[in-house]
Image: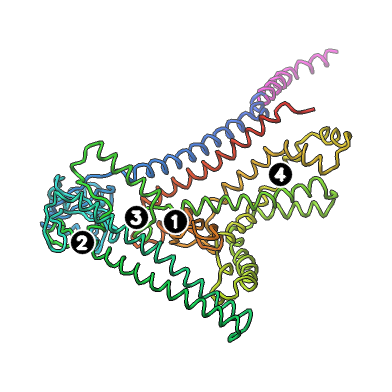
Amino acid sequence: MADMAQMSDDYSPDRSDSAASALSVVTRRKASDLTARGEPMVWAMGGSLAFGLMMILGFLALIFWNGLTAFWPKPVEVVTMTDGHVIAGEPVRTESYKPQKDALEALPANLRASIEAHGGMSTRTLYRIGNYDFYSNDFQWVPVFNVKKVERPGDLTLVERQEWGVFIGRLVSISEDGKQMSISALDAEHDKARALRGKRIAIETDEVGSINRQINALRLSVRRAEINYGQGSPEANAEAGRAAAETAKLNLDFDRLSQKAAAARAAEDALKIKVAEIGGETREFGLADFVRYYDANALSLLQKFGVYFSRWYEFLTADPREANTEGGVWPAIFGTLVMTVVMSLLVAPFGVVAALYLREYAKQGRIVSLVRICVNNLAGVPSIVYGVFGLGFFAYVLGGSIDRMFFPERLPNPTFGTGGLLWAALTLALLTVPVVIVATEEALSAVPRSMREGSLACGASKWQTIKWIVLPRAMPGIMTGLILAMARGAGEVAPLMIVGVVKLAPALPIDGMFPFIHLERSFMHLGFHIYDVGFQSRNSEAGRSMVFVTALVLMVLVLALNAVSIRVRNRLKRRFAGDKF
């Protein structure tokens, strides 16, 4: 017993060590409880969500700020260089940069020492000098060490022109048929010149254009008769005689309108304005080419708002000019809207019918599962592949067949056998149909089974149950799929570059000419307009502001379309909110 007591005493330190170890284990377990509960992951996911929202809000703020301020009139500065050279322009932005070695060596010692003290960095300002027809350049960088003096004289005028971009300088005099007039009559004479220009364009575009279309239609009718009855047949000869008589009358009208347009152009060209750029060089321009002019450094706040809103009005309602870097985007807005609506009308029946069959009629099994997998995989196919398919199948195969069947007289010039609005809408419908199918299937599966069984128990057929019970209650989910498809389709550009969109198409796909809706025409799109202005213009700086403004309009257009769809979806939700078993 004594030995055992001794052994017990000998092991007492071990017992204390074991207790300490147990306490350590308990402590470690407490430290691991935080990870076990997942709280760090909750914070990580919350932080990731907040970071993502901040990125989205920052991007939207960038677009909205640059878009909304792009049309605000800026002052014009006259910069006198140290070498005596003078430029005038709108300051665009200022940045830091590292001057070239030869430029530094040409500077005085004190300036060179100051730049070297700042790590060889200096600042420069980008000026929009305009006057491309004078200087062959729209913008010019001015280093701060080359600036001797900066002024803002009140007599400088900024003119926005139909061609050659803006002019910055002084207005000297006005003349009509060589008779000089005071510059004080500028407003009245400018209104007169713009009215003459509008009259001439209306004659050349509407009246003369209508006659040309009628003459072309008569030519095609003769060709159609020759195809149907044979060249030299009595029917073809009779049609040729009728067309010749009608063409002779139309040619008389064409000559009369041409003389009228020539008189309007002569009256328009008689109004001239003499201008002088900041260096003193003078030239004469047609007064009708002036779109807008204002004294850049003498505007009141109210006048600045007038210029600002007039620019927005022109942007939203006029055609583009100057390689799309100036003017408006109305054809692009209209083309985007029509294409999105047509795409939505095409994708809705295809997507809903396919989802109905897969969910309500098809026998569930491996084949249906394989179809669902294929549908999901279609959503991951690059959009440019859809564009190639649309051009090859829709335009060349279907469109070529339509041309051979219904428009043989126009061949080899294609009517439907090339890119157009219809084929672009069908291509985007094919691209977005997986989204509609998946959303519709989810909405159909969410309808309670008890509603179907109750309808069938009351004697309704399966189609009646689907039509009156299932589809109305699944409509909010279907609308969600359409909203997602509409948002994606409106912003796609790559397929449209192949299947119908063009740089400039002032003729709208819907107009007052029979058959009023021309789905075979090429069209303009806001997304492609952004790409064209940002990457294809001769001067990226000239189109920089236009990129932001066009992006802003595209975002607002998509938001407006989505808002209408969301409003319809919410009304459907409220209608069936309490109608459940």
Q: Which part of the image, by quadrant, shows the N terminus? A: top right
Estimate how packed mark 1 is, as few (under 14), some (14 to 19) or many (20 or more) residues with alpha carbons within 10 Å: many
State which region is magenta. 1-29
Disc 2 from disc 4: Cα separation: 61 Å
Q: Which residue is mark 1?
A: 529
Residue 414 position in % (x across, y down): 55, 72
Give the amino acid at mark 1.
Answer: His
Q: Which residue is mark 4?
A: 440
Question: Does label 2 or label 4 sit earlier along the sequence?
Answer: 2
Q: Which residue is mark 3?
A: 326
Q: Residue at x 75, y 28 (%)?
A: 579
Question: Does label 1 or label 4 sit earlier along the sequence?
Answer: 4
Disc 2 from disc 1: Cα separation: 30 Å
| Mark 1 and mark 4 residues within 8 Å of each other at the beta carbon | no
Residue 385 position in % (x across, y down): 61, 62
Q: Is residue 462 above or below residue 535?
A: above
Give the amino acid at mark 3.
Answer: Glu
